[in-house]
Image (cartoon, rainbow, N blue to C red):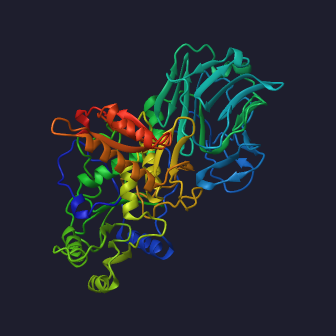
Amino acid sequence: MRRKNPADAVRQAGSGPTRPARRRLSAGLLAFVSLALVGGGSLMVAGPAQADVTDGLVLRYKLDETSGTVAHDSSGNGRDGTVNGTVDWKGASGLSFNGSNTYVKVPDNIMAGLNSITVDFDVWIDPAMGKPYFFYGFGNTSGSNGNGYLFATGNAFHASVSMTDYTAKQDIWPSNTSYQLARGMWKHVTYTQTGTTGILYENGVEKARKSNLTITPGAIGGGTTTADYIGRSLYANDQYFKGRMRDFRVYDRALPAAEVRAVANETEEEWAQVQALASHNQALDVFQDPTVGPVIIFPSDYTGDIDNLEAPPNWTDGYGNAPTSWPTPTTARSPQFTVGQISTIQDAVMTAVQPEDGSTNYRLNIYYDGMHDQVVAQTDAPSSITDPLATQYAGQLVVKSDAVASGKCAPHQTAMAESLGENAAPASGTNDVTTQLQWQQVQALADYNCALTAFDDPNIGPVVIFPSDYTGDINDLTKPPGWTDQYGQVPVSWPSPTTAKSPQFTLAQIKGIQTAAVDQIAGASNDTTNYSVDVHYDGANDRVVVQTDAPSSVTDPLLTTYPNRVVIKPASTPTASDG
């Protein structure tokens, strides 16, 4: 996804009911940050910073250590955990659990005296994870069985409490009891319980609720629990967890829905709000500085008060939620650019690289980079065109190569795949920003690596399917260079979809079936009939689907010619949302 031109991003400021205070970044600090990054590498974004909800913390393991066997408790309560088995720290990407012996032993009696509880953490489930397993289990064991416990698992996604073993457990299930937590991508899981009500959340969105629980956390074991684990079940025959976890928290209260959502989606929510502030207040750019956090850059001649930005009135996020508070980004003016000066450079570059007479066909992406206070032109135009521009605007314009990378699909491959593949997203859609972002990344991986399609498998999560004759390494997909989310941020981590090759199709073979289907159905049309036809590849079933309103007398020859490769389905009825 490419950034908008800064001139296009500027909006007229309107009146607003509130004026959040903002920290100000001095020109000197801006220059220091810019020079440091120019000399030392590109902008690095830290791991997702969770909301600062600390009231009632019993323990908090950030799991961002780089060595040792101690999971440090940052709550201030001194309840450090001990990592057993194979220890594989991933820094900001959490602790890696190998599925055979890695687990964290939490101090005994972690739920003693608790009538209410919240257990909250980030989790990445390895696609190879078997079942059954526990994300965590707090309780006791008797022989090889659990004997009173609280646990949650992702396959199928639910939480449970019991005073004895599985025969007496009380489950908190989604309405769809077969629902699986997607694998190969980060998820945020929260379980809250107060009184008789237990609620299970995925990425801050309620997925399950039970309102007649009879077991409180503190009642388990009479307050004595000696098998308090993260990454290990309380049943000896269950599997150890395989994947990663980070920022594991336990509270002595049930977080309300607003706080659960804030903790789960704070990073994405904040960036949506920062972007809205930048746009509403006529900013040039917004970026994440690794030291001071979000930064908004304004034109050098900006006359507004950058220390007192207006919040856009009536703004809501993509799910219709109005902020209860606004973030406080650092603000600064560009040392050298007005909007007009940037537009002048843009016009000059576009005139040279993409003249209106169409005499050249070079790619061009031009934008203002607030982090380095420069205009960047990404293009595959030759140096004979770009060198004079770089000389004319020395210190203001940087030209970067946009040559096609070796792993990138050729234009005809991309166009064919996009026309034949289905959208990469869960059939049920997405209702939280974290999941939505990761599915965008899955689609970007599929597109960049010349896949046929990507889809959601309810048991293992994202799956990317490649042509049968694909020669690349499907186990080591190339991440699209320069890809950013809708707020211009480079992802901290990427999903790891399951990958496979089609057992029977190359892209050319699918294209051949598409052509044959269109010819067959269009050829049967006449002055009184005009059959519709849509052809796409169904990766989940490895079939080419032909959707049409043509009768079977027209479509049967396709089934005969392409046995076990073509499926005929009725044409879908257009809706108002289809445009």
Front residue of this view, candidates 167 and 222 = 167
Residue 23: x, y in percent?
Answer: 36, 56
Residue 309: x, y in percent?
Answer: 27, 52
Q: Viewed as shown, does residue 11 lie left or right of 429? A: left
Q: Is residue 314 visible?
A: no
Q: Viewed as shown, does residue 275 lie left or right of 458? A: left
Q: What residue is drawn where x is 25% and y is 33%? A: 575
Kindly indicate the quadrant of the structure image that contains residue 360. bottom left
Residue 263: x, y in percent?
Answer: 48, 39
Front residue of this view, candidates 301 and 156 = 156
Front residue of this view, candidates 286 and 503 = 503
Q: Is residue 27 above or below residue 506?
A: below
Q: Is residue 415 visible?
A: yes
Residue 199: x, y in percent?
Answer: 52, 24
Q: Is residue 469 above or below residue 198?
A: below
Q: Is residue 118 above or below residue 508?
A: above
Q: What residue is drawn where x is 74% and y is 20%? A: 221
Front residue of this view, candidates 65 and 556 = 556
Kindly indicate the quadrant of the structure image that contains residue 130. top right
Quadrant of the image containing the C terminus: top left
Q: Is residue 323 above or below residue 449?
A: above
**Total tally of numbered discs in the picture:** 0
Kindly indicate the quadrant of the structure image that contains residue 167. top right
Q: Viewed as shown, does residue 156 lie left or right of 20? A: right
Quadrant of the image containing the N terminus: bottom left
